[in-house]
Image: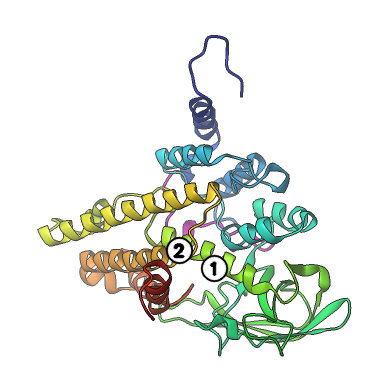
Amino acid sequence: MTMTAGSTESPTESFRAELRGWLEENCPEEMRDGGLTEDAICWGGKDWVFTSEAQELWLKRCAAKGYTVPTWPVEYGGAGLSREQEKVFDEEMARINARSPLESFGIWMLGPALLHFGTHEQKLHYLPPVARGEVRWCQGYSEPGAGSDLANVQTKGEDKGDHWLVNGQKIWTSYADKADWIFALIRTDKDAPKHKGISFLLCSMEQAGVETRPIKMISGVSPFCETFFTDAVIPKEQIVGEENKGWDVAKYLLTHEREMISGGGAGLSGGGRALGAVLADTMDVLDANTRADAMRCEVDALAIGLTLERYKDQSEAGQGAGDASAMLKYMGTELNKQRHELMMNAGGSDALEWDGPLGNRAGDWLRTKANSIEGGTSEVMLSIVSRRVLGLPG
């Protein structure tokens, strides 16, 4: 961007004007509805089926500009935006209520881990397809005997020289049946202490020996899966970070996962309408208690939003959220549950129907119960906050 002689417009204002013009010209009208429902999300991937021509066009236009991952370096598929420009980007997207062009575990979790721990060759190979929505990733962390105690993973990788031979089981693998690749914690040294001896490996879901089985949830849908590895071959170059030091990668990624859950759980991702306005659609008159509860949720969501922005600023200065991400995750989880409780109350008997005039509001409400478990249980998050943030005795 250039500034004409005598211009007093700051670089930030110049960027805002340029971005605003681009969004007005390129964001389809159908993509200006906030897009906070599950049906509106574009997950991408090799087998993704677009819900409309507008959804496909919006993804392609944003990917060409690097706007699916605006802060990633240009060479890895991003737009290379600074922290200040990212704030402007978020504000301008919210101004027109634009949908996020792409949601992805590759963006939220794997991307930050690769940018921090990956080699230049790995970043060039794996990140641009994520930014273009061509590859969909899932997370292979939890196991039947390793949930909150994640370092107890037992899925093992035997060293075969140029590859690992992997055997074991993962569980609660979100969208594994729709993913193209998985990033997984694999025990590569069974004799090391449990926080050691773990490696962070990347594996194609089409790899021989990888099988998924969906798990039916109380909400009636099956986003979670069991994932089985039976003599699966994972080449040595598909390790991120150092061998047997995958726990460092895992902890870094978990911080980003918890921040993602806190933002999404608090309704902070993308545009969207105020909770009071949503409730008013299904109640002729909002009673005083409902109005007060809705306002309390909105204020708390704004507070979390500001806190997230503060931690992002600190991250830019070399200080991440660290253990405080547990606090954000817990609050985002609780707010999401409160919001859906209010929406159920406002909907009355109509909200009890699975596919009634209010859609699957009951299923969405039931789904929020899993927020207290995924990404670390609420009890574990409170324990982290008490010990590592507040410094209370164990």
* Residue span colored magenta: 32-48
Where's residue 204, x and y in %? Answer: 74, 71
Please tell me in which quadrant of the rendered image residue 185 appears.
Answer: bottom right
Please tell me in which quadrant of the rendered image residue 196 appears.
Answer: bottom right
Dot 1, how many residues are within 10 Å of its Cα: few (below 14), some (14-19), or many (20+)?
some
Residue drawn at point x = 67 percent, y = 73 percent: 246
> From this viewpoint, which residue is outermost toward the top?
6
Dot 2, how many residues are within 10 Å of its Cα: few (below 14), some (14-19), or many (20+)?
many
Q: Is residue 82 left or right of residue 355?
A: right
> From this viewpoint, which residue is outermost toward the left?
288
Q: Is residue 284 left or right of residue 125?
A: left
Helix, strand or loop for disc 1: helix
* Badge 1 amino acid: Leu
Helix, strand or loop for disc 2: helix
* 158 in relation to 378, above or below: below
Which residue is the site of mark 2?
Answer: 325
Where's residue 95, x and y in %? Answer: 40, 38
* 130 in relation to 232, above or below: above
Which residue is the site of mark 1?
Answer: 254
CB atoms at circles 1 and 2 under 8 Å apart? yes
Q: Closest to the observer: 84 or 136?
A: 84
* Badge 2 amino acid: Ser
| Residue 33 is covered by the magenta coloring | yes
3D distance between C-alphas at marks 1 and 2: 9 Å
| Residue 338 is covered by the magenta coloring | no
